Amino acid sequence: MKPGMRRYYYWIHHICVLFFCLSSTLTVHARENAVAVLLSQEIAPYVATVNGIDTELVNVQVERFFLDRHGLPFNLVSQTPSLDSGYYSALVAIGPQALQYLHSLDTNTPVLFGMVLNPSHIIPDPLELRCGVSLNLPIEAQFKSLVLHFPWMKRLGVLFDPKNNQLWFDQAAQIATAMGIELVPLQVEPDNGRLRIVGDLSRPDVLLFIPDKSVISTVMIQHVIKRAVLHQIPVVGYNQFFIDSGAALSFVIDYNDIGHQVGVQVKTLLTTGNCDGFHDPNYEIRINTDVWRLLKLEQRGGAHEL
């Protein structure tokens, strides 16, 4: 080989080695300082959750991705249009579809989650369900609150679709029985494109709505609340919408606070390499004082916060 060609390949070799070293350094740096957050949809509750995450991770590079109509992630920032899991120190799923997508990836990057109802339905193996904050309110804590606010309650009706929440109902029934409460199933089933309630709506002392993807129609929820109020039955919901629609009480989850909870878990993971499992969301109890007075619940011995 001619001396000139040797010098050419010599410099090419060293340039390639230098480029490889620089690339490796940049990649490690990016992995130590970057977290990808994937949103199932761009809706207000999910955005509020991510804002809470951002508040906790002020010194961490957080990049937001969204799922398109084909179920694939995209980034509004053109610098990283696709989600390369190997680039990040942690992946965070917001919503069930995002968790399904991240769980399907063949990656060693830790996956955390928030805003997911029944996460074990998506990731059945508890060893793989590492860290996150679900949307499931603790059953026993709910029932204790209901007994406090409605001490005369003997029968608690639950509106649900058995395809989605039969397991929840079975678990809740055991807890209720131990507390001296009869759980009354009010199942919904499709009927010519609409949902029909199977069960006697006038039988329960208190009616409880639980998160159920089949029971999300605004018209249906408000109709059930009106029927319950006509029977002097207080309704309990799980967000502010129920209070605004005539429920007597609601367990209200702060979505931004869920983001703070997830953000703390991400920080723990980045600093220690471990995270502490998944948790129930924080929530507060809100009372509809107008409905409380309308149903004269105070005269029936109901505790309240006026």
Image (spheres, rainbow, N blue to C red):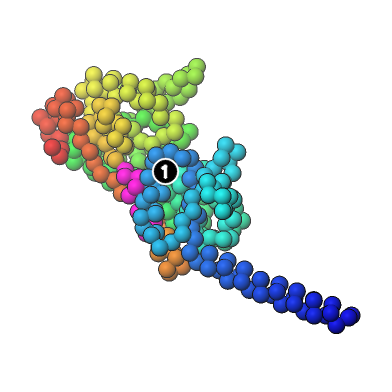
Front residue of this view, candidates 170 and 26:
26
Residue at the top extreme of this rendering: 192
Which residue appears at 39% of the width and 59% of the height? 57
23 is within the stretch colored magenta: no
Dot 1 alpha-carbon crowd within 10 angstroms: few under 14, some 14 to 19, many 20 or more: many
- The amino acid sitting under disc 1 is Tyr
**Quadrant of the image occupied by residue 287:** top left
Q: Main secondary structure of the magenta part?
A: helix
Residue 114: image x %, image y %?
42, 49
**What is the secondary structure assignment of the residue under circle 1?**
helix
Residue 280 visible? no
| Residue position for label 1 | 46
* Magenta segment: 253-265
With 251 as the anchor, is 99 left or right in this view?
Answer: right
Which residue is at 36% across, 55% downward?
55
User: Is the C terminus in the top left, top right, bottom left or bottom right quadrant?
Assistant: top left
Q: Is residue 305 visible?
A: yes
Q: Nearer the viewer, residue 166 or 60?
A: 60
